[in-house]
Image (cartoon, helix red, strand yellow):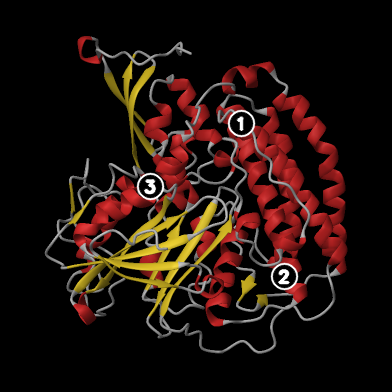
Amino acid sequence: MASRFDVVQDAESRDTYYLNMGPQHPSTHGVLRLKLHLDGETILSVDPVIGYGHRAHEKMAENRDYLQFLPNPSRVDYISGMIYNIGYCQAIERAMGIEVPERAEYIRVIANELNRISSHLLWLGTFLLDLGAFTPFLYAFDDREKILDILDRVTGSRLTYCYGRFGGVTLDVDDLFLQQTAEFCTHFKTRFALYEELVIDNVIFQERTVGVGVFEPDLIQKYGVSGPCLRAMGQANDVRKDEPYGIYDRFDFDIPTQMAGDCFVRSLVRMDEMRQSVRIVEQAVKDIPDGPFIAPKVPKRIRPAEGEYHFCVESARGNFGIYIVSDGSDIPFRLKMRTPSFANMATMPDVMKGTLLSDAVAILGSIDIVVPEIDR
Amino acid sequence: MSLLANIDGVRETTDIDHSAQGFHHLHVITLDALVPVTQTFFDNGFYLEMMTCQDRREADGIFRLVYQFCTMSTPQRHLVHLDIDPTTSAPSIAHIFPASDWLEREVFDMYGVGFDNHPDLKRILMPEAYPDGAHPLLKDFVDPESKGEADGQSV
């Protein structure tokens, strides 16, 4: 089907111009700059300029031991920091062969999935804000605030969690936490109808998103797209199912997929993922056993045997991989973080080509980028 | 039957314990084999999951480029090692996997390794105006802005 916005082939014969979107544009969710080449309002090419939020996490890793690096991963992606923090712990645990007690595994799953819901809620609010709808933001943040309060009470932080420890978690959770979590799940399930009515069924929202920013299937292999963007292209891939880590293989949950690959179905996939996360949390709260919350004997000195290790988890944005090269000492020789937004962002020149300038805002919002995660 | 058995320049292929290290296979290749190896992975449905570099100049006098190819479902993760002399550059694979466009730029930015035939090799994370020759992930990197300070720390 010919698009309404076919790229003008003989661009040189027309007056075209360059426009900088960012680095301080509100809809770039941080400091990201898009160098747009425009013909009228049609985008001829995009050159994303990244690195404004570079904090040299990988260099820091080479200058401190494994335990000292523990607070860093959650700063890489501060929206789903719990998943990164615990993912790093799991990577070290596997390299060191540390056994994690059952109760700690369940606590981790609950914390991870709550964090995933809060991340998706933040996406929902800010995405709609980008599209010009202010009200859903207030509802989404109302729910998100409940999660932050629940996690704040047991972890001590609201965003940049450092709750995981090698072999378990920092502090045990109490009955009140489980009760609050169960109450949140009950409450949150009643909210889906509201979000559907307010957002998904909204005709303006659909006009702005249906058929906009379609990812062509070949991008999957070329760029390694992952997360909800991938699942909105009909691929049912999720690290939690494909390469189960922790105790994810014990839970009953589905991988929501959609076929169209546009902004609208990416939203549907995230809405469904929140439902699945609620399912996982409810099962975990029901089954959580008593017992220790951290392994009794964790080696004082973390020194993985010489070699290379890779561990990946499903963050709220996709496949987050940690690649560690150990030379047998206390300090990592090399630690590389494969962040999902980096790969998803790299597709932008292909995806945005030929779309309208206002659609660029919708596309950026719909892939749910977190700029510090791209820049590390 | 190994995937890369018929390619010259694949020096060594070993199996790795996935449950302990997260990889299934390790291939050590030479410079000439990189493009055919990458093409083979592309033709067999792999994607480029990650690419980076290790600064092994002090111990072995080399840069080790690391490529990680993976399949989508039921992951098969292949690790590819390419050791290069610090004075040479490597061929770019951005024409096969566009993902490596940014990843190669990052390696260039952080280690100063050049890539032949890269579409637009420039810094990606550090500012464009960052001093030439300053590559932060080199083991002997000294922050140009703190040069001459006494503490001797690289960060």
Splitting the image into 4 quarters, where does residue A229 fall?
top right
Direction from residue A113 to residue B146 in the image, left or right: left
Q: Secondary structure at mark 2?
A: helix
Q: Are marks 2 and 1 on the same chain?
A: yes
Which residue reaches farthest left? B87
Between residue B48 and residue A329, name the one nearer to us.
B48
Indicate whether A36 appears above or below A255. Answer: above
Q: Earlier in the sequence, mark 2 or mark 1?
A: 2
**Which residue is label 3 attached to?**
B42
Q: Are marks 2 and 3 on the same chain?
A: no
* Residue A31 seen in render: no
Splitting the image into 4 quarters, where does residue A43 fall?
top left
Image location of residue A110, percent across then percent down:
74, 60
Q: Residue at x 51, y 68 (%)?
A: B22
**Which residue is label 1 attached to?**
A259
**Which residue is label 2 attached to?**
A105
Q: Residue at x 55, y 41 (%)?
A: A230
Looking at the picture, which amino acid does disc 3 mark? Answer: Phe
* Residue A130 seen in render: yes
Looking at the picture, which amino acid does disc 2 mark? Answer: Glu
Image location of residue A59, percent across then percent down:
35, 67
Question: From mark 2 to mark 3, how far is it between C-alphas?
Answer: 37 Å
